[in-house]
Image (spheres, rainbow, N blue to C red):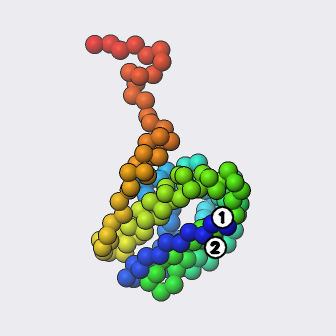
Amino acid sequence: MIKNVHIRDLGVPAGPFIERIQELWPPTWGKQEFDRPLGVGADGGHGPIRYRCTEFVPGDSITFEFTDMSGSHTLSASGTVLRHELIGRFGLVDRLRWALAIRWLHDACLEDLFDVCERAAGREPAAPARWSPWVRLVRRMFTPRANPDHSRPGHSQRA
C-alpha cells in the first residue's frame, strides 16, 4: 500500500477551499473537469488521471476513487489546515509508475495546489513550491506540445 500525505496551514478556515478545488486547480496540471457539478457520483479528473467522487461533505472533505488504479485521494479541512491524503493499493506495474514518475508529479501538483489555496487565503506561501529537475524532465517527456501551424504535416509555409 502507498500512502502519501500533504498538509498546509492556510491561516484562515480551510473548509471553504474544499468546494473550490476546481476553481483553484493549478492550470499547469490540466483542467480539472467533471461530468456534472462536483458531488458524489461525479466522474472526471485532470489530464490522464481519472477518478470518481465517492464522498463529499461541503466544508469538510471530498474523496475520489481512481478509475484506472485501485486507490483513493481525499482533500479534507480541519480548522485552518488543508490535508490531502492519497492511498494506493497498486499492483506491480502501477507501483513502478508511482516510484518513477507519478509520485514526483503528484507531490509537485499538490504543492502547487496548496500554494494557490494559500494565495487565495490572502497570503504568499512562506516557501513556494519549486519543481525538481526530475519533475521538469518527466513533464517534458510526457506532456504533449502544441504544434505551431508551420510544423503540421501537409502545411505549406508562405512568405
Name the residue carrying label 1.
88
Estimate the x, y position of residue 148 in percent, counting from the top left.
39, 28
Gap between marks 2 and 1, in whole Å? 19 Å
Picture layout, residue 65 above or below residue 141? below
Say what secondary structure mark 1 lies in.
strand
Does residue 98 appear left or right of residue 119 in this picture? right
**Residue 35 visible (yes or no):** no
As shown in the figure, which amino acid type bears the numbered disc 1? Gly
As shown in the figure, which amino acid type bears the numbered disc 2? Phe
Q: Earlier in the sequence, mark 2 or mark 1?
A: 2
* Residue at (38% x, 51% y) in the render: 133
Number of residue marks? 2
Occupied quadrant, residue 85: bottom right
Name the residue carrying label 2.
56
Q: Give whichever of 125, 120 is nearer the camera.
A: 125
* Residue at (47% x, 14% y) in the render: 154
* Residue at (38% x, 56% y) in the render: 131
